[in-house]
Amino acid sequence: MNIGITVYPTYGGSGIVGSEIGRELAEQGHTVHFISSALPTRLTELNERVHFHEVEMMNYPLFEHQPYSLALATKLATVARAEKLDLLHVHYAIPHSISAILARESIKSKFYLPVITTLHGTDITLVGADRSYLPITKYGLQESDGVTAVSRFLKQATIETFDFDDIEVIPNFICPSYYQRNMELPLRNELSPNGEKLLVHVSNFRPVKRPIECVEILAKVREKGENARLVMVGSGPERSACEYRAEQLNVKDDTIFVGKRANISDYLAIADVFLLPSESESFGLAALEAQACEVPVIASRIGGIPEVVSDNETGFLSELGDTGKMSDDALRLLQDDDLRIEFGNRARELAIVRYSADEIIPQYMRFYEKVLGARSASAS
């Protein structure tokens, strides 16, 4: 199969998942064409089965803002015709599904190019914050040849927001061989020179991730006598506020900001507890990656997280903003090695059984075949 994939080339979950889907499909013998404004974060190697096509923007004085949606539509149509794509798989409804549908319509006199849209979350919350996007987003869903969502929570949210329910739930996934525990990495001694336990948080430091609460959890844990440090992986608008809060709470020296990292799995491999106090998560990919590394998760009981983290089995869930309970749960895990190991073992088992690439990629292939089959039947 010859597949086109469009993602936001960022550190966010959608870019990661889209890149991993393409890589896994290529390993199975399919040809994948990534069409994006920049090389996706996880796309580290191009070969005869993995190709990258950069969306080039036009600089023209008339445009106050560069028309990326139109440039993407043009590139999608060009690549589809040149490479004879079987389908386009776009991640995020806005603007990717709209651009893909425009590309499909522009070349339909030559051949029909099915469009599959995968929803990752902000597609829905964006509309919740600004209803002016509702008509165009709903159009993108209705005109897509197939729509998937990464969690049952997100499917239900889409139904409630758009009154659209023709959605297949295909969750995010991990590669078990890539995410593994490894306490022997030199990084462990570097971050924990005196044997401190390590709390780890990974995100893009947007307000919705509530990274400041991770600092507050660390402060509470240390107040109760546990020698722990916090490793903050990533960067974004809340980073400076986190640094200031760490200084206020006298945990500046024990809060380590490492910035954006490509080797996130190394930080998870040496973590003791993973913190995810977000106020909105359609799935919680970072929590899944941590669990695959045998790391128990402390998280908010919101969105799709309960589908990923089993409360009192692979981690602990709390009400939004309850940093008191989160710190108590973290302390319990940090002080009880047997419990932490037990939770970690269960966490990896769950990650592999439910969310390994070997489980999820075939679901995408069946969905591709279903969409292509429906199109063939319609054409006949």
Image: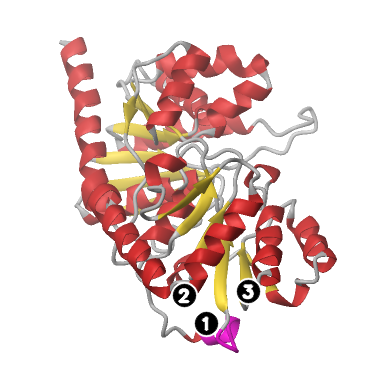
Type of the residue with mark 1: Leu
Q: Secondary structure at mark 2?
A: loop
Q: Which residue is mark 1?
A: 187
Q: Nearer the viewer, mark 2 or mark 1?
A: 2
Answer whether residue 193 is magenta in the image.
Answer: yes
Residue that appears at 23% across and 18% down: 375
Quadrant for the N terminus in the image: top left
In whole angstroms, how far apart are the C-alphas of marks 2 and 3?
A: 12 Å
Type of the residue with mark 3: Arg
Q: Secondary structure at mark 1?
A: helix
Mark 2 or mark 1: name the one nearer the start of the chain.
1
Disc 1 and disc 3 in contact, CB within 8 angstroms:
no
Residue that appears at 32% across and 24% down: 114
* Location of residue 223 by image quarter: bottom right
Q: Nearer the viewer, mark 1 or mark 3?
A: 3
Answer whether residue 272 is magenta in the image.
Answer: no
Q: Which residue is mark 3?
A: 229
Q: Which residue is mark 2?
A: 270
In whole angstroms, how far apart are the C-alphas of marks 1 and 3?
A: 14 Å
Residue that appears at 47% across and 52% down: 316
Residue 220 pos. (x, y %): 69, 63
Disc 2 and disc 1 in contact, CB within 8 angstroms:
yes
Relative to residue 257, is residue 89 depicted above or below? above
Type of the residue with mark 2: Ile
Mark 2 or mark 3: name the one nearer the start of the chain.
3
Image-based side of 235 in relation to 73, left or right: right
Relative to residue 188, is residue 28 depicted above or below? above
In whole angstroms, how far apart are the C-alphas of marks 2 and 1?
A: 8 Å
Mark 1 or mark 3: name the one nearer the start of the chain.
1
What's drawn in magenta, residue-wise? 187-195
Residue that appears at 43% across and 72% down: 269
Relative to residue 114, is residue 233 depicted above or below? below
